[in-house]
Image (cartoon, coloured by chain):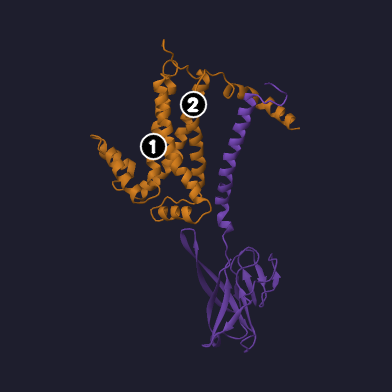
């Protein structure tokens, strides 16, 4: 019964043990990894409309701050996050509106408009942005983000479309 | 190349002699009943691994414990799978450890020179039951709450020291957030640390003495 291709009892046991062990490791390991990284694979990007205020109350020429709070379900909890931005009207034209996010494009701190310096200043790394969001100096890689989609409803309210991260 | 790497490691770690002493040691003729200890060890490691994964989402607070487990079961990919293994593995481990004890008793394997192995084994059974008792509270549902109420009340019926034991177990006179927190602590740190230490000594003794022969008719 001993040909050249015959495997010994010992090698058979070793092979079987390795195969079963490998099978258990894979059936356990793959779900475990999927379980760990699950929150990163959940879809986001829900859109919501935010009412900023009456258009007639927003001054022309100076950035007008606004903020809004969005609630998101994270796991077994609801998390409220406050976002803020600036509305800049260059003229009376209801379409001539620039809406900037006040989230610094460097590392996410909140920028504030300083009338005396005519700049948005980020407190974290002293970055300066000009009135339309362009970078004057500091580390930010790009201008302030914009909310490009907005409209004015029948009651004269400025509505901004916001997309969640 | 891999063989060379293996030789390099072996020269420094002594892998070969480790293998010979631990996995290739001579054994008396046995049967499947002799595998229950290894099966218990495997389940312990499995419980450890799935338990670590459960703590990714589980929160030991009365406000969130139940919700976080509901989330593991319904909201996370394979959460039901990880928790299912931990749940059924726990029951199976208690059964296996106990049957392992019965086998050692029936084959008289606890006799000289293995008395210490036996005593430590009894400790391991008690710790396993402790893991079951503390883990049972963690889902913080009705069954968990009242089972722990009853369990700690029984411990509290000890004469004289009962009141003290009850308070020490519950972290106060009532079943509260403190109870959940300390049961969680015991379940994931204290009892596993003791288990690992005792399993280490248990395994060392088994390797040192080898397994016992089955008793023959003459014995």
Instruction: Tell me, for residue B130, which label it has, or none.
Output: 1
User: Gap between marks 2 and 1, in whole Å?
Assistant: 27 Å
The subunit carrying tag 2 is B
Q: Quadrant of the N terminus of chain B?
A: top right
Residue A161 locus on image (x, y percent): 58, 76
Residue located at (56% from left, 69% from top): A46
Instruction: Tell me, for residue B32, which label it has, or none.
Output: 2
Seen as rendered, the residue at the extreme top is B218
Residue B129 locus on image (x, y percent): 38, 36
| Residue A87, quarter of the rendered image | bottom right
Residue located at (51% from left, 36% from top): B45
Callouts 2 and 1 close, C-beta under 8 Å: no
| Residue B156, quarter of the rendered image | top left
Going by the image, does A149 lie left or right of B66? right
Going by the image, does A112 lie left or right of B5? left
Q: In the image, is residue B122 above or below residue B168?
A: above
Q: Secondary structure at mark 1?
A: helix
**Badge 2 or badge 1: first in the primary sequence:** 2
In front: label 2 or label 1? 2
Residue A148 locus on image (x, y percent): 64, 77
Mark 2: give few (<14), some (14-19) or many (20+) Cα within 10 Å: few
Q: In the image, is residue A160 above or below residue B147?
A: below
Q: Name chain B's colour.
A: orange
- Asked if residue A68 shows in the view, the reply is yes
Instruction: Tell me, for residue A82, which label it has, or none.
Output: none
| Residue A3, quarter of the rendered image | top right
Residue closest to the eye, A85 or B59? B59
The subunit carrying tag 1 is B
Residue B197 locus on image (x, y percent): 48, 30
């Amino acid at each position: 019964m001993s040909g050249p291709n015959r495997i010994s009892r010992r090698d058979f046991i070793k092979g079987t043990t390795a195969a079963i062990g490998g099978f258990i490791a894979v059936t356990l390991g793959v779900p475990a990894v999927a379980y760990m990284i699950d929150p990163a694979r959940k879809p986001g990007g829900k859109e919501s409309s935010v009412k900023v205020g009456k258009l007639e109350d927003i001054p022309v020429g100076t950035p007008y701050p606004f903020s809004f709070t969005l609630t998101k379900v994270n796991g077994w909890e609801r998390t409220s996050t406050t976002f803020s931005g600036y509305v800049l009207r260059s003229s009376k034209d209801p379409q001539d509106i620039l809406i900037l996010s006040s989230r610094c494009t460097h590392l996410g701190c909140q920028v504030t408009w300083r009338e005396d310096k005519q700049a948005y200043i980020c407190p974290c790394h002293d970055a300066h942005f000009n009135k339309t969001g362009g970078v004057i100096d500091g580390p930010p890689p790009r201008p302030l983000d914009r909310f490009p989609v907005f409209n004015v409803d029948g009651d004269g309210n400025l509505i901004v479309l916001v997309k969640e991260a | 190349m891999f063989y060379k790497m293996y030789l390099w490691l072996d020269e420094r770690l002594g892998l070969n002699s480790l293998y010979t002493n631990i996995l290739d040691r001579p054994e008396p003729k046995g049967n499947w009943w002799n595998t229950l200890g290894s099966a218990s060890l495997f389940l312990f490691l499995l419980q450890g691994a799935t338990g670590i994964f459960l703590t990714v989402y589980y929160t030991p607070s009365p406000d969130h414990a139940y919700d976080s487990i509901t989330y593991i079961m319904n909201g996370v990919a394979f959460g039901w799978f990880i928790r299912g293994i931990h749940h059924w593995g726990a029951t199976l481990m208690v059964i296996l450890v106990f049957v392992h004890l019965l086998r050692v008793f029936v084959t008289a394997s606890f006799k000289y020179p293995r008395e210490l192995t036996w005593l430590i084994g009894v400790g391991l059974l008690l710790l396993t039951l402790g893991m079951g008792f503390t883990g049972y509270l963690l889902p913080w549902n009705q069954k968990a709450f009242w089972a722990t109420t009853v369990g700690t009340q029984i411990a509290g019926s000890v004469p004289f020291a009962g009141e003290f034991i009850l308070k020490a177990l519950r972290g106060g006179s009532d079943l509260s957030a403190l109870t959940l927190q300390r049961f969680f602590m015991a379940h994931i740190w204290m009892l596993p640390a003791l288990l690992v230490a005792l399993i280490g000594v248990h395994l060392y003794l088994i390797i040192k003495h080898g397994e016992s022969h089955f008793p023959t008719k003459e014995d």
